Image (cartoon, rainbow, N blue to C red):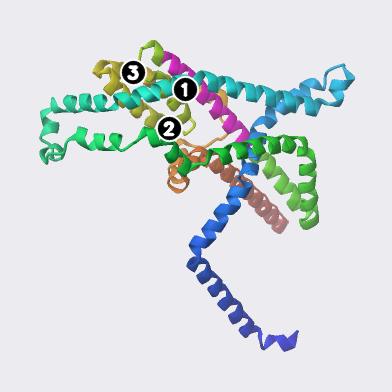
Amino acid sequence: MKRFEKYYGWIIAFVFCVAVIAVYKTFDNFNNITQYLAKIFDAVKPFFIAFIIAYILNIPAKRMQKWLSKSKKSFIKKHTLGISIITIYVLAIMAVLAILRMLIPALYKNIMDLYNNLPNYITSFQDYINNFEIIKKSSLFANGIDLYSEMNKIVTSIDMSQFGKYAQGVYNMTTGLFDIFVAVIASIYMLIDKERLKKGIFRLMGIFLKEKRANSITEHAKRINDIFTNYLYSRLMCSIIMAVVCSIVLMIMNVKYALILGLFIGAMDMIPYFGSIISFVISLIVTFITGGVWKGVWTGVVLLVLQQIDGNLLGPKIMGDSLEIRPLWIIFAVTVGGALFGFMGMLFSVPVLAIIRAIMSDYFTAREIKKMSEESENNE
């Protein structure tokens, strides 16, 4: 060992140079690396989707398996796992197909109607703005900028006859359907082999980690799972309720594109705080343009009431106080998550923050207990 000590400095310098070269080559070939990583992600994407499907359907499958285990028939008791998984998947697929069958024709009609009438709505909006002298005298209109002309350029630039080519450039339909098919099949096997996968992970942790560390990781994993499950199911339930209620209420009020707006409000309800604001403003603008001032005002009042019920009564009732996060930190998490990772960042930022908070809280508690025990030993 001593004969290597004189070369120790050279070894450190060599490792440092290799690290510098590696970092340089990484940035120099950054595009190639990102393309390679994108290919890897495309390859594993079906399995990532499969994990999400299995994670979502795991709870209803577990509950059905528990219910079937009480059956007196030996065949059912022997095959509770398989029967519960098949039943849940059949029900889920039937529900998705039924929803698509009901929504797609109405959505298509609403979207095509909106596309065909969009120039007229822009003209009406332009005429309405022209009635306000203070807006007409503003710098935007004083410089001769015509709102209709500018927005009409955007509308006319969309060639609906070429929509298939546009969509094909973003996402290949055949590959997408294949990925979904593979994901569904893989998710079934994930649920079937769930216990074996868990045992394999525990075995690996037992080999490479000490028992105390492995138990700590297991406890944190259970806590993370509880936080994610509770949050996602609760928010999804609130969003579905909001989508259904808002769609029905807007239809009763004879608001144009009620179905689109209702679904949009429900989807945005998945995002805390900002989602309700964005959906409220956009729904108000659309109703204002398509239905006039008074219909826009009444729609705004109704949506405001529904969102207050959702935020102050429905949400707390379903979700409870499981996250225990102050509103300021939720706003911070959604803002940072949206800035860094877009919509998915806004969607998952709150449970991620809750997980970080839980882990940090456990760490601080352990440190405090250790410090108190050390102080008590010193006093003795």
Tell whether 29 sits left or right of 206.
left
Element assignment for label 2: helix
Q: Residue at x 47, y 38 (%)?
A: 330
Image spot of residue 69 (x, y percent): 82, 22
The mark nearer the N terminus, 2 or 1, is 2
Image spot of residue 21 (x, y percent): 54, 74
Task: Give the number of the mark in front: 3 or 1.
Answer: 3
Residue behind mark 1: 310
Q: Which residues are magenta?
A: 225-249
Image spot of residue 324 (x, y percent): 55, 35
Element assignment for label 1: helix
Tell whether 12 sits left or right of 335.
right
Residue behind mark 3: 299
Q: Residues within 10 Å of mark 3 (few under 14, many from 20)?
A: many
> Which quarter of the figure has residue 277?
top left
Q: Residues within 10 Å of mark 2 (few under 14, many from 20)?
A: some
377 in relation to 118, above or below: below
Q: Amino acid at mark 2?
A: Gly
Question: Distance from label 3 to label 1 (Cα)?
Answer: 16 Å
Residue most toward the front? Answer: 161
> Which quarter of the figure has residue 265?
top left
